[in-house]
Amino acid sequence: MRLYDTARQGVFPLEAGPLVTLYSCGITPYDAAHLGHAFVYLSFDVLKRRLRDSGHEARCVRNVTDVDDDMLRKARELGVNYLDLAAQEMSKFERDMQMINLLPVFAEPRATGAIPEILTLIGRTFDAGFAYEVDGSVYFEVSKFPDFGQVSHESRASMLELAATHGGRPDDPRKRDPLDFVLWQPSLEDEPYWESRWGAGRPGWHIECSALALRELGETIDVHGGGRDLAFPHHECEAAQSEAVTGKPFVKHWMHVGLVGLDGIKMSKSLGNLVFVDELVRRSEPSVVRLALLDQHYREDWEWRDELLLKAQSRLATWRSTQTTGRASSVLEDVRSAIDDDLNAPEALRAIDDAAHAGAGVTSAAALLGITL
């Protein structure tokens, strides 16, 4: 199998042993997960299915960011406890992911369940000389880490712009460098807090994923990723703080998934231009929704159109109409080859189309893609 690695900016063999470790950044459950989220987790699901098909144990961890700025702001607006809000939205999320036939993940740890590990990791970062404290806030000092930028390859100007967009507060006067990022911060009066050697407070966003990934999967992960918009600042900061402490490569392959748009604009909770899995399932069966998503290459940005659902419905009907013949095994190999070529799901679908139109059975090939005929 060959996968694109964002850090090396090319397609490289996935060199792994019998156990392949995967970490997919999960949702911040303050609102309903949309089709863009589903596309990310479906892409990891395809990878996981093929790895297991080829004899590997694929261990996938998908975290839950249940305490951060967005989570607490939404809970404040609604007048509810942030953990109650997380539980409500996670229930919807799990239901939606089951509907499109995602395999269960190995673990789905929550940030609030790893506060001791987070504090230990911040302490190690601080003690190693990569962090500093000002007024109860602890920051990672990016100038001390020469490889900062190795994941995203963004310019400094772009980093500053992206940091501001994603809550990095480059204008914080307490920072030694505008790109320094927070590891620990004092909590506001109505926010949850935990005691630490720097005072009562709560963790920053990036340190949560590092602590969970290191705890669940070890110091070097085979494949780590999420939506393309996480490359900076989230994954860049994760890599810096993790490698600063362990001295080892944090990730072998950074896998970033394209963004899904609607009406010419990226789907965003803040803009409200969203399409939801449960909404589509009310209009068609879940396998059709999964097929519509599989028809997009995981690395490409794309836009949702209702015609994609109609195309998937027609495709599924054709597949189901075929009769099993001796050609079924060769179709399966074609699908395997397509997935091994940087998760080329659209090419895998075309291979099944060709076999189905020729009257060959495609049940096993479809099953590898998570489609039950």
Image: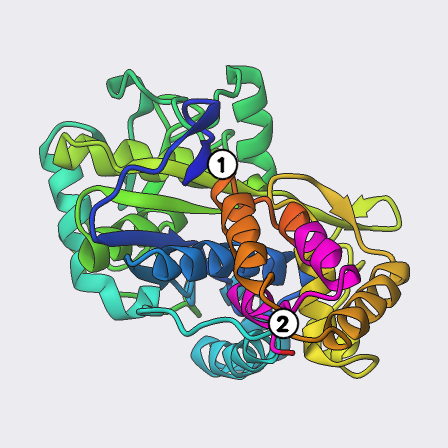
User: From mark 1 to mark 2, how far is it between C-alphas?
Assistant: 29 Å
Name the residue tied to disc 1. Answer: 231
Q: Which residue is mark 2?
A: 77
Image: magenta residue range: 349-372
Residue 148, located in which quarter of the rendered image?
top left
Quarter of the figure that contains the C terminus:
bottom right
Mark 1 residue element = helix
- Name the side, left or right, on which 192 lies relative to 363: left
Identity of the residue drawn at 63% across and 72% down? 77
Above or below, comparing residue 255 to residue 348 in the picture = above
Work out whether residue 223 or residue 207 is closer to the camera in this orientation and state it: 223
Q: Residues within 10 Å of mark 2 (few under 14, many from 20)?
A: few
User: Where's residue 64, x and y in %?
Assistant: 41, 65
Judge whether 324 appears above or below 53 on screen.
below
Q: Dividing the image into 4 quarters, which one contains the N terminus?
A: top left
Asked if the magenta segment contains residue 365, the reply would be: yes
Of circles 1 and 2, the one toward us is 1
The rendered magenta stretch, by its main secondary structure, is classed as helix
Q: Where residue 117 sits in the image (x, y, percent)?
A: 17, 58
Amino acid carrying mark 1 in the image: Ala
Snapshot quadrant of residue 202 = bottom left
Residue found 53% across the figure and 45% down from its top = 343
